[in-house]
Amino acid sequence: MRGAKYVDMLNEVDKDGKPTYFLEEDLKEVYKKRGIDIDKTVQKINELSKERTKHMMQIGKALNEKKNTEDIKVFEDEVEKLSEEIELLKIKNARLLEPCIEQQLFLYVYTYLVFLCSEKLNEKEEWVKVWNTFEEFENSDEKLVNRITYQATVIFKNEIDLGL
C-alpha cells in the first residue's frame, strides 16, 4: 500500500504538467533559497537534545548525592526550557516539511492505521469496526476522527517511548 501510494504521489502532476508534490530534499532546497535551512535546524535540535541530556544526568547525579532541591530545580528548569525550545523547532520543521511526499505518505499511512485500529463495542458486547470502509472514515465526523487519532497517537507514542 505504502509503495503504491508513494508512486502515485510521485507521478501526480498539476494542469501544467508540474509535479504536485515535492520530495523532502527538493523542498529543503526551495526553503534554503529563501534563507530557511532545515538541516541546520535539525543540527540545532540535536545540540539542544545533547545539552538537555547533560542536564538530566546532572539531575540524576544531584538526586543521588542528595543535593538540595534548589540545585536540582535549576537543572529541572533548564531541562524544561530546552524541551520547549526543541519542541518548537520540531513543530516548525514539521510544518515546513508537511507538503513533501514523505510527510504526506506518513500522514496517509498513519491515518489508514487509525482507520484499521478503530473499533467500538456494539449492543451485543462485541468489538466491531467503527467504519466499514476507508472512504466512510474519510467522510465521517471530523471531531470523532480527531479524538480517535489523538488517542491512537498517545498509545503509539507511549509504545515507542517504552521501546515496545
Image (spheres, rainbow, N blue to C red):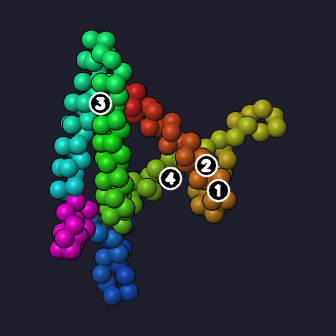
Q: Earlier in the sequence, mark 3 or mark 4?
A: 3
SS for tag 1? helix
Residue 149 rendering spot, x and y as whole percentages: 55, 48
Q: How many marks?
A: 4
Q: Which of labels 4 and 2 is toward the front?
A: 2
The amino acid at mark 1 is: Lys
The answer for how far apart the CA atoms under marks 4 and 2 are is 12 Å
Neighbour tally class for label 2: few under 14, some 14-19, many 20 plus, Cα within 10 Å: few
Query: Quick one: 16 or 151, which is closer to the camera?
Result: 151
Residue at figure coordinates x 20%, y 50% from the top left: 44
Q: Which mark is residue 147?
A: 2
Name the residue carrying label 3: 75
Q: Earlier in the sequence, mark 1 or mark 4?
A: 4
SS for tag 3? helix
Residue at figure coordinates x 64%, y 56% from the top left: 143
The amino acid at mark 2 is: Arg
Seen as rendered, the residue at the extreme bottom is 16
Q: Which of labels 3 and 2 is toward the front?
A: 3
